[in-house]
Image (cartoon, rainbow, N blue to C red):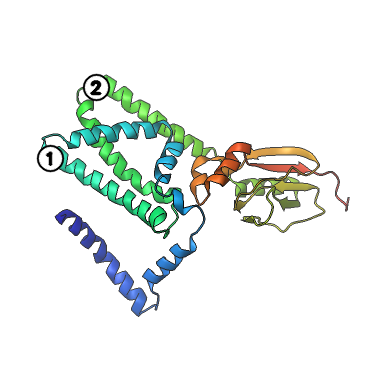
Amino acid sequence: MTRLLYVLIGVLIPMLPILIYNYSVVNIDVIEGMLSQVEGITQGMYEEGAVLPFIYLLETEGLISLVWILGLMLASREALSRRPNRRDRIMLWLTALLILYGLMALLSTGLHVIVLFGRTIRTLVPFIVLICAYGFAPYAKLLGSKLRFLLISALAVLALMNFATAANVQYYTVLVREISDEYGTISFSSQFVPPSWHHGFPNPVHEDARYELLNAAYFYPITEMTDLPDGEVIMKVAHPYNYNPWQYEGMTPEMRDIINRDGLYIWLIDKGPSVEE
């Protein structure tokens, strides 16, 4: 508890001057602003907050999440050992992890104050990694250097596979620029029906344009999709929403189901010569 108190004091020391300056000089109540911002974040589903960290990490981390589960189990076993140095350090990180998760579950499912996003859940990861390091350490020492190197290399490959998936996501902002350079005037639309809203269209809609670009933006909420318009499909690219972590940034389970069931793509349709032509 003493160390936790020191941590809280360490956080408050740099924060208090900032809060006081904003309130007295700039006339901005930072705390009130943060609370009002939280109240405005209602995308997603409060009720799934308690289970969302488990779903999110399993869905987005793949095999790495199974390694973490094993590490947490080994660390919990190590926490029951009679070696105070190891037990105390593991208990510190386990306590921090449980408190952080408990606050997430309480404020979302319990009190309906915040909706959990994937980016919020990722604050658990540093504590999970620290705990796993202590859980694996005694067993890693029993292995030979070559086997230990192979296991670490395998974990690195698993992590790189996750990074590679993220690196291969094609974002609509880049596609729009490239397509506009090649095809000129484009009409923008989507397969979603109201009340879904979007942002990200850099150009106005041109009804008489020959080429129509569908779904090249951020959409919320995700609704059932309509059929493609008439014309020749020139391009089909997976929308970033097909990347699992993006599906946990304010989406409900129903929205995720729609994307995973049907897939969401960015389409470029050639509707034939325009009216002007």
Pointer 2 local density, CA inside 10 Å: few below 14, some 14–19, many at least 20: few
Q: Is there any visible trace of residue 88 in the rendered image?
A: yes
Q: What residue is at 80 percent from the left and 55 percent from the top? A: 207
Location of mark 2 (residue): 145
Q: Mark 1 vs mark 2: which is more N-terminal?
A: 1
- Quadrant in which the N terminus appears: bottom left
Q: Which numbered mark, 1 or 2, is in the foreground of this view? A: 1
Pointer 1 local density, CA inside 10 Å: few below 14, some 14–19, many at least 20: few
Q: What residue is at 19 percent from the left and 34 percent from the top? A: 78
- Image location (x, y in percent) of residue 166: 50, 39
Location of mark 1 (residue): 85
Q: What residue is at 46 percent from the left and 54 percent from the top? A: 46
- Image location (x, y in percent) of residue 110: 38, 55
Q: What residue is at 70 percent from the left and 49 percent from the top? A: 180
- Image location (x, y in percent) of residue 101: 33, 49
Identify which residue, 182 or 168, lies in the foreground: 168
Give the residue type at disc 2. Answer: Ser
